[in-house]
Amino acid sequence: MFDKVVPLEAIGVKEELFLYWRRQGLLPFFPKGAWARFSFAQMIWVRILQDLRSFDYAIGKMLALTEYFFKRAYEDGLPERNLRVAREALQKKVVAGTISDEERALLDYIDEVLRDEALLLAFRYNINYLTNLIVWCLSSGEEAGILIFSDGKVGEYASGRYYSGGVVGGVDPSAPHIYLSIRHYLGEFMEQRFVDVVASPLQVFSEWEQKVLRAIKDPRNREVRVELRRGKINKVEVVAEDVILKGLDAEALRKALGLKNYERIVVDTVDEKSLVVRKTIKKV
């Protein structure tokens, strides 16, 4: 969704037009002087600009639409707000005792991000009200769209409701307007027969595959080992960050395990009463 991997020429926009849009403030996620590579969400925004241009939609009104989705999100601190909503939901699971290991790892990651002001600032350039609408359309599999009225007012459609600026019922859908379907744009970037599948991530990945993806994304994990059996995931092992012991703690543990220089051991659990200790000589 957010990785900038698609070059400008791949989405059919001439460089002159791109530079003009950037000068007009229609591409706020590209700083001046940076060469353009687009994320999936940004490609949809460019397609919206192309369609509005084909309608001879005024640049000034395009800028108002840009401010609605991007500048407003930046000023509202939307990424932080999204993270705090997710954190609150996970905290409720902690209190109820129903949180999973994956959810606990996500909660730790959210707490880490919320403490990092530089990372939160970077997120402000990628997470906005348009990406919220796209993510909702993908996760729900339902229609979502943008309404643009003749006076420049902007509305959104999702969950079977119309709203503007976060206010439900903030627009009159019976008034003449341009309607831009998010589902339509999603269909442009993937074969139509895959749209319904992608709209539900649980249908795309098995439970094991989801565990692998979560493990890979967890910044605390140094290594993820996947064992396949007959082409299917059989086991997933995660190597977390090293824990370094020094001084008396290290000496006590070395003596207890009989560990000499240039040797290493791997301790594995078998059952509640037994441990397997595998010793390896690293250098002779």
Image (cartoon, rainbow, N blue to C red):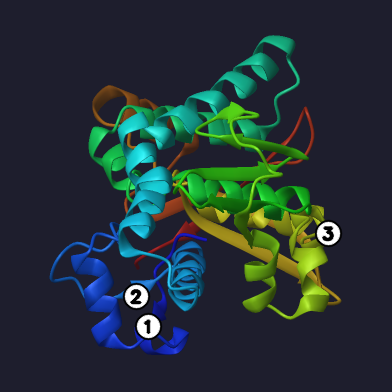
Q: Is residue 92 positioned above or below 271 on the image? A: above
- Amino acid carrying label 1: it is Pro
Give the image quarter of residue 212.
Answer: bottom right
**Mark 3 highlights which residue?**
203
Nearest to the observer: residue 83 or residue 148:
148
* Residue 13 place in picture, x, y as percent: 38, 85
Looking at this rendering, what residue extends furthest in the top direction?
95
Labels 1 and 2 touching (C-beta < 8 A): yes
| Numbered badge on residue 143 | none
Labels 2 and 3 touching (C-beta < 8 A): no
Give the image quarter of residue 167.
Answer: top right
Q: Residues within 10 Å of mark 1 (few under 14, many from 20)?
A: few
Q: Is residue 77 positioned above or below 194 on the image? A: above
* Residue 252 place in picture, x, y as percent: 37, 26
Q: Earlier in the sequence, mark 2 or mark 3?
A: 2
- Amino acid carrying label 2: it is Arg
Describe the element under mark 2 as helix, strand or loop: strand
Q: Earlier in the sequence, mark 1 or mark 2?
A: 1
| Residue at mark 2 to residue at mark 3: CA–CA distance | 29 Å
